[in-house]
Amino acid sequence: MKVEAVTPRRPGRIAAAALAGLVLVWLVYTVVVNENLHWDVIAAFLFDGRILGGLLVTVALTVLSMGVGVALGVAAAVMQLSDSPVLRGAAGLYTWFFRGTPLLVQLIFWFNIGLVFPVIGIGVPFGGPMLVEWPAHQLITPFVAAALGLTINEGAYMAEIVRAGIRSVDPGQREAAEALGMSHGQILRRVVLPQAMRVIIPPTGNQFISMLKTTSMVSVIAGAELLTVAQRIYLENFEVIALLVVASLWYLLLTSLATAGQHVLEKRFSRGYAR
């Protein structure tokens, strides 16, 4: 006797899906027909030169901060896993301090670093002569202050992500590499990190997406990124909501592209582990 499987009906699921779809359509309709949003202003400023310039600064800050932050994170993670208590202590102090203080405070501090060190230069330490020096207010521009704050803060978070990824690798892999006569550096580059990438990539992708939005905090030091530019424009024409919508649309586009890139990288580094 042939048995045919019958999918049970789920009226509750169908009703919930219909309700969710109805609410979504209502929200879209409400937004589209709302005259107070001033869609003509949004369309006029969406590709405005000033907005695109701020968008470029946002992308530059994100790429620079994440690139250097990942390098700092890898270095700090390796130090945390070192046999040297001095290296472990230094890396632990770095991650503890910069993860424990608000990013907003760090950005404001770097922007006002000239109040602590009026002159920044290179010279002999412990009171020796200065070889090269610059006035702090000229060297630490809003962009430089933003890059310093975002990079150093991101490095502290990446250190924990990389450390978790390295610890996820089977110790037998390192032992086998040592048996082949590889040095510690070769083992890290050729054996440990390639396998740890499967664990490192997902949270790193999340950090990159978060960084795209976190750059908006640079507006407190007038960093000329996307939100700062939008604020400057709406202070002139008082179209606050319209300019915030413009900024939000660009943030959504950037994060969507970053999400797609994250999925591609995750798929690539998960080969051999999952279908």
Image (cartoon, rainbow, N blue to C red):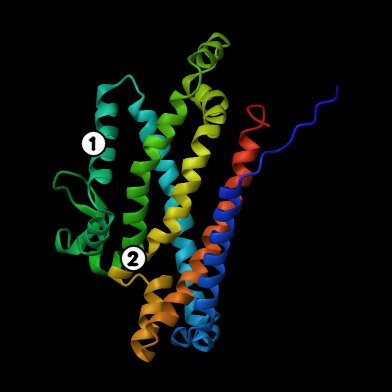
Residue marked by disc 1: 93
Residue marked by disc 2: 218
Q: Quadrant of residue 20?
A: bottom right
Total count of labels: 2
Could you say which is closer to the camera, residue 253 or residue 163? Answer: 253
Instruction: Nearest to the eye among marks 2 and 1: give it.
Output: 2
Circle 1 crowding by C-alpha within 10 Å: few under 14, some 14–19, many from 20: few
Q: Residue at x 51, y 33 (%)?
A: 199
**Percent position (x, y) of residue 197?**
54, 34
Q: Residue at x 43, y 34 (%)?
A: 162
Circle 2 crowding by C-alpha within 10 Å: few under 14, some 14–19, many from 20: many
Left or right of residue 140, residue 264 in this image: right
Could you say which is closer to the camera, residue 92 or residue 35? Answer: 35
For label 2, the SS is helix
For label 1, the SS is helix
Disc 1 marks which amino acid?
Leu
Left or right of residue 97, residue 149 in this image: right
Could you say which is closer to the camera, residue 169 or residue 87? Answer: 169
Left or right of residue 138, residue 272 in this image: right
Q: Verify CB contact (< 8 Å) between mark 2 and mark 1.
A: no
